[in-house]
Amino acid sequence: MSTIDLNHTPVLVVGAGIMGAGIAQVAAQAGHKVMLYDARDGAATQAHEKLAGSLQALVAKGKLSADAVARTLSNIEAVASLEEAAGAGLVVEAIVEKLDAKRGLFRDLEAIVSTGCVLATNTSSISVTAIANGLKHPDRLVGMHFFNPVPLMKLVEVVSGLQTDAAVAQAIFALSERWGKVAVHARSTPGFIVNRIARPYYAETLALLQEQAAKPATLDACLRAIGFRMGPCELMDLIGHDTNFSVTQSVYEANFFDKRYRPSLIQREMVDGGLLGRKSGQGFYRYPGDAPQTATSPLIALALPPVTDWCLHGSGVFADLLYQALTTTISVNADKAQSTSPALRRAPQSEWIGLEVDGAQLRLTDGRCASQLGDNVCVFDLPLQSSGSHAGAAQGALAWTASSRASEAWMQQSALWLQVLGFQPQRVADTPGLVVARTIAMLVNEGSDAVHQGVCNEQAADAAMKLGVNYPAGPFEWLSIWGAAPVCTLLDALDAHYRGERYRVSPYLRQRLWKD
Ligand code: NAD
């Protein structure tokens, strides 16, 4: 494999829209001469002027030096025809997301640029293999998938099609890193890494809404509590339901209608009705003014309820977290009612994790409904720490539910115990896997399938989700905290409950059972 050096090469950026202008800026800041072309008359010049305005504003705020801005701007030249860019060593295409337009452009470019010129596409959903089809040198075409806004978002997915030369992919990887980005290799498959692994973040929430398990604000609060910057509903409102729905639909279709990726009726109804989110003034929430409710209330200092016998069941990181939270509360309230209570017992060999109080159970979800587990049983969601890196001090909204045969007294006490543990309990319907557990399990499962199918490796999946969509952790980081066995158990329980293809466990994840 020969090495291709793109370090000082002139770059042609085709398409001067949101992405093209950002890519031109980043390349020019890295010292490249950049030619910017757009099919619409005047668009490239307008993009250059707009960029000048926004960079000058950063100079005024003291964030950039006037010299650096002058250098960047002088590196960018708006060109009126592709022929003017014949000397480019790299083309980055950021035109309209249509296969025919992209294919046509690259075929035209092959007649203009030298045979050594690398051709990169910023497509977010079209197969790189398909774009290369018909080119004289399909091996020099590669995906260079930036994220919006390009100057701020660190991730670049370097996407190889069937015919992409490994040296070309490596050259784009090295160049992206030189431009200050974190590059990850991906194989050209529907959604690449980020848009594929992210599907369950929306899909699980839409499924919960469809079965009326909880309100959007509750679901958002539960996922924000574990470190997502936005809950799925507010995020879909921001992205726009039309855009979000069409990405889901294209991943679904491209996977030959695999039910795992099936779009949601709820979202289609919203698109059909013009409830597109922020841009139309209404989605799950109304805009402006009606900010999403956090559905949480301030924590109050709580004393432990009186008990005659209590035991903490199970072992591992989540059992330890509960134990720690309980013993902290015990020591803080040492002079109050619980001083008459017996000592908290531990039963690490138990098959379930949670608290047993005088025969009633408050259990961490294992994917089964509370009603399936017994009479006086309540179930709570996965208490991941908000940093996402490990389980830790309890905080924020946490979903819980109750068996249909649980006593009113135990339901009230369960909510109280969750508050004692430091959570803001959010009652949801008796649905399997509740909110966080099923969402994270499905993200882990999707990441596992991506690795299983050679789309990327584990490190790339983690980096892509953290840097491409600001997840608090990557799927394999969550897997290392939670463990393959409980994730498989939870998914199997969901599969048994819903009986469809959606929750089938990735073979890669199942195989991890024998490794961990
Ligand atoms: P945009 O609509 O803002 O800009 C596209 C530009 O391309 C327009 O200025 C248009 O005039 C120009 N154009 C269209 N056809 C052309 C042609 N044949 N030759 C030259 N110029 C042409 O779009 P965008 O959001 O910048 O997206 C561009 C590409 O980047 C798409 O492939 C999109 O899927 C991808 N992408 C977008 C985002 C995003 O968040 N917007 C993120 C990642 C990737």
Image (cartoon, grey):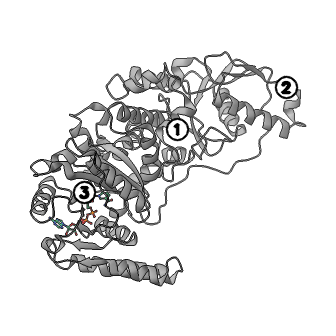
Sequence-first disc among 1 and 3 = 3
Q: Which residue carries the number 2 mark?
A: 341
Q: Position of 98 compared to 46: left or right?
A: left
Residue 281 quadrant: bottom left
Residue type, mark 3 in image: Ala
Q: Secondary structure at mark 2?
A: loop
The residue labelled by disc 3 is 120
Position of 3 with respect to 69 (left or right) is left
Residue found 22% across the figure and 49% down from its top = 126
Quarter containing ligand 1?
bottom left
Closer to us: 445 or 340: 445
Circles 1 and 3, Cβ within 8 Å, touching? The answer is no
Please provide percent x and percent y for residue 345: 78, 21
Q: Is residue 279 above or below residue 347?
A: below
Asked if 92 appears above or below 303 in the picture, the reply is: below
Query: Residue 219: where, in percent of width, then height?
Result: 49, 44
